[in-house]
Image: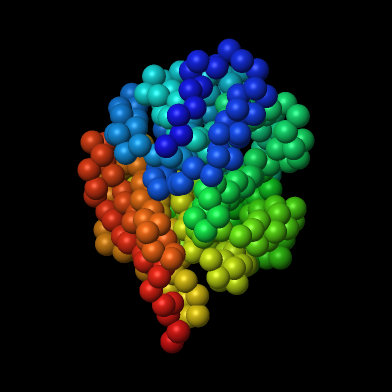
């Protein structure tokens, strides 16, 4: 468990905070508990943080819509990040866990926006300020907020790959005929349709070759569920196929964390001669959605529509990790769960 106290150091410069936290994370502390979630209205109470703290996560991953910025006024955007960061229970989490984050449309700055958002570079700097990123960091000097970090000792390493699904994404294609109960978008298989952009793809291919026993990929939007007509990797079928092919070729245990949907579900894809891929969707942390019958051929079990967060427990006692994933409610009770033992031989037919 990390015990780095940001509260005591919040008056220090960003570089000092970052340097101390990175030195601590380089201590090869074993990662056994990871929590995650998305979609937080900064104007509403956030009682769920108490339950998050109670599971004692070594790492917490914010998956986007961490605030609802939706503005082209950067002073207003900064103020909303500041309001979120001032929440007492969230500060308690920051003092005991490593915080990682990606953004989605509402904290990026505009609903369903991509590369066309005119203040994306300014929003990037505000987002990195929230994360205490040092001023001379390469993450500040290059477009987008994607990043990667590997934690844990040799043989028990967890690699976190944080994707940017906003900064480089081309506009979504509106559905010619909107299906009943579906969202307004449809797949775009044009060669000009992009989700990650050229440079991020090159970076991702390199990072997926970094040795680790478990890869956690943070994507603000769902990868496996593709038929609901809202934002999903399925709107960019060539990019989705490229990602799945890359994950298959890495031959690594990989789990996708996603948010956005204001509901939670666990999806699983079994591929011949490859390890299974999970997509764990946790949303929303302080909002509810009316139950629906949305289809997802990869879903395991049911959907959960009330406030929730996700949790991963890793058992390192065997040669390969045994991973238990769950969706927990406002009180921290398990509502959905699934386990993968990566020591079991992979599917071959």
Counting labels gives 0
Residue at position x 59%, y 64% in the image: 243
Residue at position x 33%, y 24% in the image: 45
Check the image and tell me how it is coloured: rainbow
Query: In x, y percent, where is residue 213?
Result: 51, 60
Query: In x, y percent, where is residue 117?
Result: 67, 37
Q: Quadrant of the N terminus?
A: top left
Q: Nearer the viewer, residue 336 or 134?
A: 134
Residue at position x 28%, y 56% in the image: 337
Examine the image and state in which quarter residue 266 appears.
bottom left
When the figure is inspected, residue 303 is found, relative to residue 119, above or below; the finding is: below
Query: In x, y percent, where is residue 219?
Result: 53, 50
Q: Nearer the viewer, residue 91 or 75?
A: 91
When the figure is inspected, residue 344 is found, relative to residue 190, above or below; the finding is: below
Q: Is residue 240 visible?
A: yes
Left or right relative to 112: residue 340: left
Q: Quadrant of the C terminus?
A: bottom left
When the figure is inspected, residue 9 is found, relative to residue 129, above or below; the finding is: above
Residue at position x 71%, y 65% in the image: 191
List the single residue furthest toward the bottom.
Answer: 349
Q: Is residue 184 visible?
A: no
Query: In x, y percent, where is residue 102?
Result: 55, 41
């Amino acid at each position: 468990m990390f015990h780095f106290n940001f509260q005591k150091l919040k008056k220090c410069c960003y570089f000092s905070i970052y340097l101390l936290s990175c030195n601590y994370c380089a201590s090869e502390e074993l990662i056994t508990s990871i929590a995650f979630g998305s979609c937080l209205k900064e104007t509403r109470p956030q009682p769920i943080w108490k339950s998050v703290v109670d599971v004692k996560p070594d790492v917490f991953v914010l998956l986007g819509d961490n605030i609802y910025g939706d503005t082209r006024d950067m002073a207003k955007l900064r103020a909303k990040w500041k309001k979120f960061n001032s929440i007492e229970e969230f500060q308690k989490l920051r003092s005991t866990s490593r915080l990682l984050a990606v953004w989605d449309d509402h904290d990026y700055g505009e609903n369903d926006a991509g590369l066309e958002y005119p203040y994306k570079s300014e929003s990037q700097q505000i987002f990195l300020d929230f994360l205490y990123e040092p001023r001379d960091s390469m993450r500040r000097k290059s477009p987008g907020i994607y990043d990667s970090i590997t934690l844990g000792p040799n043989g028990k390493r967890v690699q976190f790959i944080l994707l940017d699904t906003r900064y480089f994404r081309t506009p979504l294609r509106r559905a010619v005929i909107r299906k009943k109960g579906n969202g307004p978008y449809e797949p775009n298989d044009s060669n000009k349709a992009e989700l990650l952009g050229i440079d991020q793809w090159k970076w991702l291919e390199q990072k997926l070759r970094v040795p680790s026993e478990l890869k956690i990929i943070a994507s603000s939007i769902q990868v496996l569920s593709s038929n609901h007509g809202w934002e999903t990797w399925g709107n960019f079928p060539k990019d989705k196929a490229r990602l799945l092919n890359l994950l298959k070729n890495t031959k690594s245990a990989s789990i996708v964390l996603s948010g956005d949907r204001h509901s939670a579900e666990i999806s699983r894809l079994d591929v011949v001669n490859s390890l299974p891929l999970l997509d764990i969707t946790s949303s929303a942390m302080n909002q509810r959605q009316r139950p629906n019958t949305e289809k997802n051929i990869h879903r395991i079990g049911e959907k959960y529509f009330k406030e929730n967060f996700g949790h991963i427990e890793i058992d390192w006692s065997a040669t390969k990790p045994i991973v238990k994933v769950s969706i927990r409610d406002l009180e921290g009770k398990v509502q959905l769960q699934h386990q993968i033992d990566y020591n079991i031989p992979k599917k071959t037919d």
